[in-house]
Amino acid sequence: MAKDGIGASVRRKEDQRFITGAASYTDDIDRPGQVYAYFVRSAHAHARINGIDKGEAAAAPGVLAVLTGEDVKASGWGGLICGWMIHSRDGSPMKAGPHPILAQGKARYVGDHVAMVVAESYHQAKDAAELVKVDYQVLPACTSTAGARDPGQPLVHDDIARNTVYEWELGDRSAVDQAIARAAHVTRIDLVNNRLIPNAIEPRAAIAEYDRGSQGFTLYTTSQNPHVARLVIAAFVGVAPEHKLRVIAPDVGGGFGSKIFIYAEECACLLAAKLLQRPVKWTGERSESFLSDAHGRDHVTHAELALDAEGNFTALKVQTTANMGAYLSTFASCVPTYLYATLLAGQYKTPAIYCAVDAVYTNTAPVDAYRGAGRPEATFLLETIVETAAHETGRDPADLRRRNFIPKSAFPYQTPVALQYDTGDYEASLNKALQLADYQNFASRRAASEATGKLRGIGLSCYIEACGIAPSAVVGSLGCGVGLWESAKIRFAHTGVVQVFTGTHSHGQGHETTFAQLIAEKLGVPIANVEVVHGDTEKTPVGMGTYGSRSMAVGGQAIVNAADKIIAKGKKIAAHLLEAAEADIDFTDGSFTVKGTDRAKTIGEVVFAAYVPHKYPEGLEPGMEETAFYDPANFTYPAGAYVCEVEVDPETGVVQIARFVAVDDFGKVINPMIVEGQVHGGLAQGIGQALTENCVYDEAGQLLSASYMDYCMPKADNVPSFQVALTETPCTHNTLGVKGCGEAGAIGSPPAVMNAVTDAIGVRISMPATPEKVWRALQDRRMPQAAE
Amino acid sequence: MYAFEYHRPRTVAEAVSLLKGASDGKLLAGGHTLIPTLKQRLASPSDIIDLGAIAELKGIKEEGGRLVIGALTTYSEVVESEIARRAIPALAQLASHIGDSQVRNRGTIGGSIANNDPASDYPAAVLGLNATVRTNQREIKADDFFRGMFETALADDEVITSVSFPKPSRAGYMKFPNPASRYAIVGVMVAQTGGQTRVAVTGAGPCVFRLTEAERALGSNFSPSALDGLTIGAEGLNGDIHASAEYRAHLIKVMAKRAVQAAS
Amino acid sequence: MASVSMTVNGQAVTRDVEPRTLLVDFLRQHLDLTGTHVGCDTSQCGACVVHMNGQSVKSCTVLALQAEGSQITTIEGLAKNGQLHPMQAAFREHHALQCGFCTPGMIMSAIDLVRRNPNASEEEIRGWLEGNICRCTGYHNIVKAIQAAAVEMRS
């Protein structure tokens, strides 16, 4: 293994600029002649816009333009799109209402973009925004996920009946119904997967620039996938031909899904830049992030799990209503369908599964993928119902899981919900987790807590996810409008240094280090001589970006494939230089050698020969630069077992995490330090969902949790130090054997925490388990006793 | 933020005259409530009069058996003051839980009580410890100072100069913080000073208030169990997405008992 | 417009600013010190923490004019002669950052903690960080980095 190669906890190359304040985020960039945009947002959840008087604002100091939906219409530009077509069970296509860049006719949620003011300074734009007079006719709002389809509910889109985007299903309903009818026991639960606000700490921002000479645009934006942004903005919004739009996503301060999507603000900035012929900058305020970043989760579900007399799961039936918000965001439609229902087998060999999903519009911000996207919702449901079934049937939760695990010998395993798992060893992860958590001796810790007046509980969660998104043909057959392959280009310079151009995007994941490690491992070039380039559509090959824990499993594999092309070409050159047959050349540790001899050329020498081809194979192209595109054969299936222990103060209801053990199987690991960091972050987000975070709209559609004063982000004192460990069953369909690690923590942890809370207080409550909810649950439990 | 004129007086007298001369002047102390309010455009003062350069408003001293804290003294200065920690440990402990580390480095006692946010901690200390608020014009008893939500006895041109605390024989403060903002959902200060027992509650109602029933119970038996029989109604208490009025009522009792337990 | 003078990272600076200019905007826009970030508008995230006369403050909640005459240190001013501050080095060594956006504020806050409490326990470190929100790391490695830097800074 190269010193800095696969498996080494190399310290991150990118850190130097982050720890010295030398990074370059979008808001750190200023363009010559730049002006500033500020958005007028709807204060109403639902209102007809009878007119907009921009006169006073337009005349205010420094104001250059006031744009509304009418101006967008006049420009001929279109609106935003949702890129994944879902068909209802009756075969009809999903109902995608129009998603204008600036509201046309109606405002549909608090924060909806109604007008844009551009001025010489930020203060002038913001001052003038208050002078834009919007004549609103306030309409009743539809804000309830569960009630959105009820008769008489206000219609978010006037022509979309019952606010219903689609009524979708997956699985064999009759088999499931029959199994439930025959079951020895059926566990039934109702649950809510609470709505979350992503809260990357860098708010979204954009700078749009138009060049009259080339008639092309440059857009700096906080994106996880600049090429996808370019495609959507060029081809669907219709801003310019795709090659006339350069999208740059520089350093990006976290995404968690929320920066996958194409947003109205960046499109409006492009329009203003064209009209004004000046660079236009918009930097979102945190309040705007709360209102208008795509939110996550928000499911209401009823589920039934059938068990036979021995405790084998025989069927799972699920009915979910998923809130899409006021508009269908870029990938919103696939989240509660193909990223959710397909995961409902979990780690279990349940033979029959059926899931029906109704997606609804409400007068709330759009909802789309947020760390885990569909898979946390599936895992929360499954691991809650399994734990509940264990309690209802008097079985140890670990034993019930073990009994139902897909055995190690059964892979590849075809689930009843479309996916085929390639590898896994679920029992190994669970056993390791239980051992690390000292599961055996929990009773004594519980007794110790009770002695101090505290309640203690322990909870398990065994998750699976499908990531490494995604095999293009598979997602294409399911309605995805794009392919989900990835690209890489490896370019050597004369002197042997390397640039790796990737279509993925790093916004915290550490690609500049882990991708360099791949080069060190495969090509023997020290990582100091490798630079990873991402985030600029002019520099990198067309690529699909970073989300769904795909960057290493798909993007990393593309790099490896490009490296293989480098080696193949290098062998031809080395054979010529060494006067040997190409078939006799080996390549290891950066050296081309003639088999069985000590005659060798370093990769540096071979590269030099490729650029200075004075002595060179006839007919071979000079240069050393190779591109590869990689389309995965399958999803990857990271899985793991989490154990959470909580201590509850019964007087106040406060829940503290006493310990948290996470054992994950990510297949092969490139950089353990970075992988552990990804797990830590995911765990904190999952613990946040379980204990603190909640997006709350009131009945009128006002966002009550609209700042850090009310939206409870997990802070350092809300989480413990974690115990994390790995097991390994390598992925079988990529040569790296990697599965992906970005989302696992957020997927597996909420049910572990909530199962622990349930165990501590004896009753199941909804997320987040706030002190008041816990206290009330304990009060309600005590009531009957008090009456005795 | 809307535009405003900025002033940086060197004396209280100069500050008062600037305040009188402004059409809608606002005093700026630590700024950790006022500046966020300005940023949210919830206020549009014509003039900001920054008290930050007025040396006479700063400092912690003992004076006639009392602890006197200058209005512009930051929370951190109280937390780290040997004098304050010795004189009234509960006060230093209370200050150590206000806001976060950086808020404590800027926020001041004068700014806090002049603003009288219903969820602030210092009002509970001032009322519970029976302090006296000194201004450029007079001395105001704690019982007369806090008038209602964001309302005090201060006149428009009145500037707090210091707060004077009698030393209690024992005092304790316990807070149940809002999980997001870390303001008090309920904070209870209990103190025995010169034979008198006081219990002041912040966060729970529209304005800090005394819990006389608890004061009576603790007056005869200063122990947590003395509060066992206490019943607190939810009527008139605050309710929000973090805590209903009923829950706050419950927390008052729990925090009061814990404050008694912690009192030293 | 009003004139303001202060010392930033050891250099005396004087600029004319609108009175409503925040210290963070002064640093970012007038001095081009973009290492200090803005992550919220309610003074809670801590991405903007700098040192003012040696104490950590949220530069989004201080007017530039309030900093008249003060000594300001930002993340750009920590490393001396190319030598990282022990806290910067520890953040890299212990992988205490991912996207890097909260990192400058986190580092500035942590240095103030160690200055005040060189032997802070894990609980004290977590308590001190109440005013710094990180969405990436789950705080685990931040705590480890601060513990390691404290050892370094004590010696």
Image (cartoon, coloured by chain):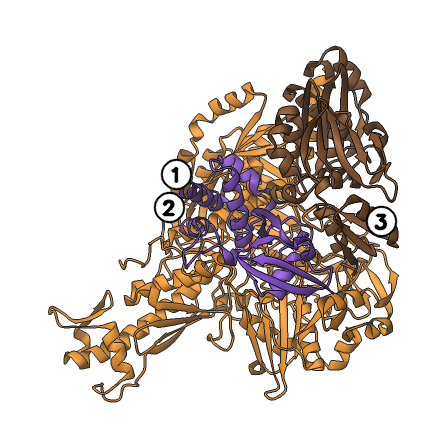
The answer to whether any part of residue A179 appears in the image is no
Looking at the rendered structure, which numbered label has been put on residue A727? 2
User: Label 3's element?
Assistant: helix
**Is disc 3 in contact with disc 2, using a CB cutoff of under 8 Å?**
no
User: Total marks drawn?
Assistant: 3
Q: Amino acid at mark 1?
A: Lys
Q: Secondary structure at mark 1?
A: helix
Q: Colour of chain B?
A: brown
- Residue topped by disc 1: A432
Q: Chain of mark 1?
A: A
Of all chains in the rendering, the one displayed in purple is C
Q: CA distance from mark 1 to mark 2?
A: 8 Å
Locate residue A281, reporting x and y percent. 66, 70
Subunit bearing disc 2? A
Quarter of the rendering occupied by the C terminus of chain C = top left
Q: Quick one: which residue is furthest to the left in this view?
A: A597
Q: Regarding mark 2 in the picture, which secondary structure is present there?
A: strand
Rendered residue at 78%/53% (across/down): B48
At which x and y percent is residue A660?
Answer: 49, 38
Nearest to the observer: residue A118 or residue A618: A118
Does the CB distance between marks 1 and 2 fall below 8 Å?
A: yes
Whether residue A504 appears in this view of the structure is yes
Residue A731 point in image, percent of width and height: 38, 56
Left or right side of A608 for B55: right
Which mark, by number, is residue B17? Answer: 3
